[in-house]
Image: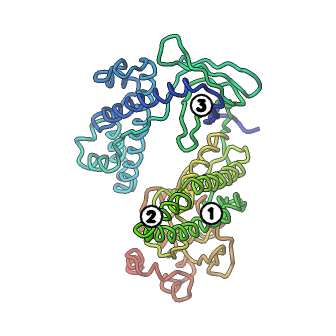
Amino acid sequence: MPKKIGATRKISTQIVPVVGMTESVKTELLFTMKKLGIVRSESYNKLGSINHWGLDWKKAIPEVKSFRNPDSLGLPAKLMDWAINDVAKAITAQQAACIDAVAKRIYRRFPGKENQNKRKELCKQLKTVAFLDNPLLHRLVRRFFQRGHSWIKNQIVYQQVGYKCKRLYRNTYQLELAGLRRGKRNRIVVRSNRKIKGQIRLIHNQLLQKFEIHFLVDHGTVEIPSERRSLGVDKGYTEAFYDSDGQAHGKDLGKVSTKKSDRICAKNRNRGKLWALHRKLEKIDSVKSARILENNLTRKTENRRYRKNQAELTAIIGAASKSLFNGESLKVFAEDLTQPIRNKRQSKAVSRKLNSWMKGVMRDSLQKWADWTGSVVTEVQPSYTSQIDSRNGTLLGKRTGDNFTGFDGVVLQADHNAAKNILARGTDFEITRYMSKTEVQAVLLRRTARWLKGMGLSLVDAVELGWLDCKHTKTQAFNQLLIEM
């Protein structure tokens, strides 16, 4: 058996519906949510600026209460405190996201081992307000830090002491929530397959006009082995994932996504005609125009269909992620697709389909199942991973659809070939995650030139033979290599 080096906890968020409450309770809860919305808004305005960089969420309550007393809103102090803490944690997460984005820029601006100490020093300054004295860091933080504002007024956060959970019968529980008056609790009935405990969030889903309870569920721990098997993963549109072992996961993703995109496109074309007719009839027949607007141009049915489509795609991606890990603790290398794909001409139909590509859901799903199985997901620089021959690591070959044809005529499955290249890039110390596409191209051209030199050929010979794409000849790196050779 493999040696164990530790364990990680498996935690997920569960959403359960509220199935019973009186009208008086409903009225009080909506009133409380509205008042807590004021607290959230003022907390963001006070704590969301750059002056509170490195905010400790535990010290946020005195900052807000210095100008806003709970009695002025008719709120219990505890409900207000829990709302402030929730806002402070969200601001802390925003600051962490900004630090991550700025760190990427730092690694791009100062690449190489010679700048390692400089990068460390700049990243260290980012953690405190000391970055304000550095013009570069100050400029980058101002660019990437999104000052928070809140208009949320549909939720209440309760800690464990703020409610009691009592089981009525199978899969049905009664919650007694802290109310506006001391000693009086609001009773609601929820449908859940487990007892609710810990911090909970009561949310009024305004789209469905229903109340929901959100809470965290701890599913125990998973053992982490000392040695994990490495796996490269290529994210795709046709299939959700294709791994370096040659297995496709989520094969129906492209078909379902295209069907959804085509349906929305056809629907919007028809709606456009109705909108034109509605505007035309506004001055001629206002009654008919209003009838068209009310019966044919609302979004209620379309929003329901859209949510259903999104849920179907999310389910496919989730099943694909589960199949990829298969309960095994892995070291997964995947593409970093956070940056948009630029300078690539494509038809409107292709652009429309790629716009519906759920890259963010794929990333979150991979991370979720990685946490669930004790795996590690490492993102790599994605440039040219589908244009490299995985057998020799050079740019000799061409991808056409689902096939990659090598310089020697051997045809490889394109996604499998890309997954192997991603796996190799995970341990490639010459190509780092935050390198630019131009820098990656220069490194690959050097490797291609060295490999051709062993065959007694040059880059120009490879272009003339049709092995190397002629687009590489227009780059500065190609011309520099010709001079050096």
Asked if marks 1 and 3 touch (Cβ < 8 Å), the reply is no
Alpha carbon separation for disc pair 1 and 2 = 34 Å
Image spot of residue 220 (x, y percent): 68, 30
Specify the quadrant that holds the C terminus: bottom left
Q: Nearer the observer, disc 1 or disc 3?
A: 1
Which amino acid, mark 3? Phe
Alpha carbon separation for disc pair 2 and 3 = 49 Å
- Comparing 96 with 215, the one in front is 215
- Comparing 46 with 482, the one in front is 46
Is disc 2 surrounded by few (<14), some (14 to 19) or many (20+) residues within 10 Å?
some
Q: Is residue 374 above or below residue 297?
A: above
Q: Which residue is mark 2?
A: 286
* SS type, badge 3: strand
How many numbered callouts? Answer: 3
Residue in the picture at 68% in, 34% down: 222
Alpha carbon separation for disc pair 1 and 3 = 31 Å
Q: Is residue 336 above or below residue 184?
A: below
Q: Which residue is mark 3?
A: 215
- Comparing 114 with 242, the one in front is 242
Is disc 3 surrounded by few (<14), some (14 to 19) or many (20+) residues within 10 Å?
some
Residue in the picture at 58% in, 70% down: 266
Q: Which residue is mark 1?
A: 260
Residue in the picture at 54% in, 83% down: 456
Which amino acid, mark 1? Lys
Image spot of residue 467 (x, y percent): 57, 82
Q: Which of marks 3 and 1 precedes in the sequence?
A: 3
* SS type, badge 2: helix
